[in-house]
Structures are given as C-alpha cells and as structure tokens.
Image (tube, helix red, strand yellow):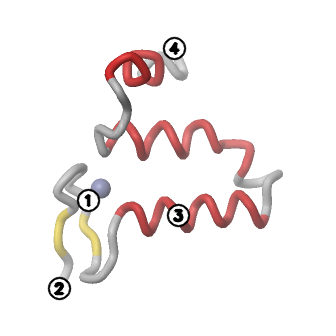
Amino acid sequence: MSQKCLHCGANIQPNESCRDRFDLCLALEFENPIAFGAVHHLTVACYMLQHNAYARDVWLEATKIGR
Ligand SMILES: [Zn+2]
C-alpha cells in the first residue's frame, strides 16, 4: 500500500521517501555525469521547490529557471 509524501503529495511506498528517490537521482548523476549530470540543476531545483526546501530568496531565483 502506498502513502503520500507530506511535502509534495507524491505516492511513495512504505519505507521510502522522496529524499530517497532524489538521492538515487544524484547517484545516477555521479555514475553517468554526461547523461544525468546534464540536468543536475533541474533535478535539484525540482526537488527543492516541490519540498519547499529553499530559503525565500533562493526560491525566488529557482522559480526563474527556464523563463
Ligand atoms: Zn515529496
């Protein structure tokens, strides 16, 4: 049975968190920087924005990515 992340509302499995998935993405970046490292800024910004983990001034800058 899945549960929801309290921060972003994603369905996650018991004993799993969005942080676990984020850390796996970072491991993929480390293993294959050409394929996955190329989007590091998007991976981090998406996780941080979805989990309201940025300070206000950084949040404002991060929301400008892609504009
Ligand atoms: Zn989440």
> Does 54 sit above or below residue 48?
above
In whole angstroms, how far apart are the C-alphas of marks 3 and 4?
Answer: 27 Å
In whole angstroms, how far apart are the C-alphas of marks 2 and 3?
Answer: 22 Å
Q: Mark 2: is the Cβ under 8 angstroms from ligand 1?
A: no
Q: Classify mark 2: helix, strand or loop.
A: loop
Q: Amino acid at mark 3?
A: Asp
Looking at the picture, how far across and down is residue 59, in whole percent?
38, 24
Q: Amino acid at mark 2?
A: Met
Q: Classify mark 4: helix, strand or loop.
A: loop
Q: Earlier in the sequence, mark 4 or mark 1?
A: 1
Q: Which mark is residue 10?
A: 1
Q: Is residue 15 left or right of residue 62?
A: left
The quadrant the N terminus occupies is bottom left
Residue neighbourhood size for the residue with mark 3, other residues' Cα within 10 Å, grouped as few (<14), some (14–19), many (≥20): few
Q: In the figure, residue 14 lies in which quadrant?
A: bottom left
Instruction: Please name whichever residue, 10 or 49, is drawn nearer the observer in this view of the structure.
Output: 49
Q: Which residue does the numbered mark 2 point to in the structure image?
A: 1
Q: In the figure, residue 33 lies in which quadrant?
A: bottom right
Q: Which residue does the numbered mark 4 point to in the structure image?
A: 67
Q: Residue furthest front?
A: 55
Q: Earlier in the sequence, mark 3 or mark 1?
A: 1
In whole angstroms, how far apart are the C-alphas of marks 2 and 1?
Answer: 13 Å
> Does 64 sit above or below residue 9?
above
Q: Earlier in the sequence, mark 2 or mark 3?
A: 2
Q: Classify mark 3: helix, strand or loop.
A: helix
Q: Which mark is residue 23?
A: 3
Q: Mark 4: is the Cβ under 8 angstroms from ligand 1?
A: no
Q: Is residue 51 left or right of residue 32?
A: left
In whole angstroms, how far apart are the C-alphas of marks 3 and 1?
Answer: 16 Å
